[in-house]
Image (cartoon, grey):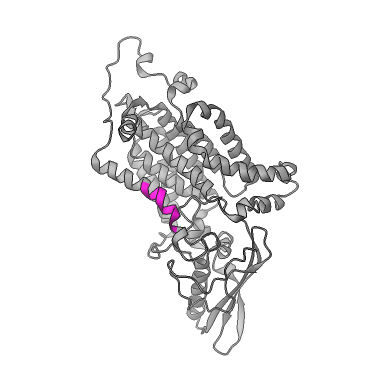
């Protein structure tokens, strides 16, 4: 079995599909950087807020000064265009992956599954000969080994399949949540509102989405089925782009990414647009170009093995940790837990308690932005970080602080409002470890 798989990965194939994937992905990344510039991401995320929510173990990572962060975004835009053109490809792809990761890891409120995927895809592209096809650069190879295309297929299937695994929980299977809450909250004047609110559609989205994700390996890799299943994926992503207003153009990236499951002989239009070099050379026969080594060296193979082992195993870590994974988000990032729940704020306030017993409400908008505020109903670590920032600012202004508390009530997946954090806890003194139960977090009432 392994010998057959190894032989499969070694097969030499036309790389135009991979080249097309590179172009489309890179252009989407250019649009992503333009979006960052349009919303003034650097100013609104790193200049105006006085508190950033740090990832575990990355508290040392701090933003560059504002002008330098803006320059980085412009450089990432240039890198994405060079990637699309196939110019200085490997280095620009690596720079894009690392630069995007530098921004991404500055604040947990920036976390999004699709940005994480963009970073991974850019890095994987840098390991291939994707710039040899549909490119401005001079070709040095005619064919590529199949593994260069397969690694993207595998990454995509992991995203789909794990998005299906997360749906195996009570809320999704029994209560049709968060689809039901999202449907109820869908504005009546929006496109397809009448359809989205239909009971039958709620069931189709809930259980159809589950089956589509779980069956993705079969649907996308088995050719006789794929030619029909592709329409299901197209409808799925187009519908998502309509009803969700917080996922930008991610559905279209995934839609375009489906091309990676094809070979060039299945896409005659691609062969017409980008014919083989020999076919355009009518004066003399073009000499064959060198063939890429069928498999990378042992070191690179081991690195790929470790990478995909991480992608397959790391998402399960949350099941081994003591806190409720989806409720606290501890252990659920980097796990492809897409649209795991729906939350709404019922009450949100922070208070400073002074040594004399008096207390005062805090205007948290002077510390964080509206995007970061959403983290306060998702991640208790963000609540703790903000409390520490509030105490630091009060002391900086010459005041004294006895405690900082928070009253946070939220609605999760259509349930009645409940406390997220113990409102009596001094958040400047609470302890945090991902490996210990957080006593200051109120457990989710699943009834």
Which range of residues does the magenta coloring cover?
309-317
Rendering coords of residue 74 (x, y %): 44, 47
For the point 30% across and 15% down, the residue is 286
| Point 48% across, 59% down: residue | 108
Q: Magenta segment: does it hold 396?
A: no
Which of these two is toward me, 272 or 329? 329
Q: Quadrant of residue 211?
A: top right
Q: Nearer the viewer, residue 304 or 24?
A: 304
Relative to 422, is 319 above or below? above
Q: Residue 442, how many percent across, how many down?
A: 57, 71
- Residue 356: horizontal and vertical position, in percent? 57, 90
Q: Is residue 13 visible to the viewer in this orientation of the structure?
A: yes
Q: Is residue 362 left or right of residue 24?
A: right
Q: Residue furthest left?
A: 298
Q: Residue placed at 48% from the left, 27% from the top? A: 223
Residue 47: image location, x then y, percent: 49, 62
Residue, far top: 283
> Furthest-front residue in view?
1
Please tell me in which quadrant of the rendered image residue 308 appears.
top left
* Viewer can see residue 341: no
């Amino acid at each position: 079995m392994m010998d057959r798989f190894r032989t499969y990965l070694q097969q030499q194939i036309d790389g135009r599909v991979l080249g097309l994937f590179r172009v489309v992905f890179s252009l989407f990344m250019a649009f992503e950087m333009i979006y960052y510039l349009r919303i003034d991401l650097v100013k609104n995320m790193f200049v105006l807020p006085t508190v950033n929510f740090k990832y575990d173990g990355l508290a040392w990572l701090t933003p560059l000064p504002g002008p330098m962060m803006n320059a980085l975004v412009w450089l990432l835009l240039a890198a994405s265009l060079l990637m699309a053109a196939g110019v200085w490809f490997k280095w620009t792809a690596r720079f894009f992956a690392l630069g995007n990761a530098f921004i991404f890891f500055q604040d947990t409120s920036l976390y999004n599954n699709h940005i994480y995927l963009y970073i991974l895809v850019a890095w994987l592209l840098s390991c291939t000969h994707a710039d040899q096809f549909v490119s401005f650069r001079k070709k040095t190879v005619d064919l590529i080994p199949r593994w260069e295309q397969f690694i993207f297929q595998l990454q995509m299937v992991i995203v789909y399949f794990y998005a299906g695994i997360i749906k195996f929980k009570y809320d999704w299977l029994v209560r049709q949540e968060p689809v039901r809450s999202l449907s109820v909250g869908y504005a009546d004047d929006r496109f397809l509102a009448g359809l989205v609110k239909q009971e039958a559609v709620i069931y189709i989205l809930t259980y159809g989405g589950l089956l589509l994700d779980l069956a993705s390996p079969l649907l996308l890799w088995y050719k006789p089925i794929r030619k029909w299943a592709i329409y299901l994926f197209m409808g799925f992503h187009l519908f998502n782009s309509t009803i969700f207003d917080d996922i930008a153009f991610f559905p279209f990236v995934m839609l375009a990414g489906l091309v990676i499951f094809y070979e060039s002989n299945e896409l005659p239009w691609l062969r017409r647009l980008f014919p083989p070099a020999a076919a355009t050379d009518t004066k003399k026969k073009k000499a064959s170009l060198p063939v890429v080594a069928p498999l990378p060296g042992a070191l690179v193979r081991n690195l790929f093995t470790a990478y995909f082992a991480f992608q397959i195993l790391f998402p399960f870590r949350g099941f081994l940790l003591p806190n409720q994974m989806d409720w606290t988000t501890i252990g659920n990032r980097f796990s492809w837990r897409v649209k795991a729940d729906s939350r709404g704020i019922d009450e949100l306030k922070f208070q400073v308690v002074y040594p004399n017993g008096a207390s005062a409400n805090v205007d948290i908008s002077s510390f964080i932005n509206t995007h970061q505020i959403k983290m306060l109903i998702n991640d208790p670590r963000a609540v703790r970080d903000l409390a520490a920032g509030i105490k630091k600012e009060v002391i900086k202004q010459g005041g004294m602080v006895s405690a900082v508390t928070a009253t946070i009530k939220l609605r999760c997946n259509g349930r009645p409002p409940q406390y997220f954090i113990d409102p009596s806890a001094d958040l400047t003194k609470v302890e945090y470890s991902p490996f210990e139960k957080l006593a200051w977090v109120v457990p989710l009432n699943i009834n």
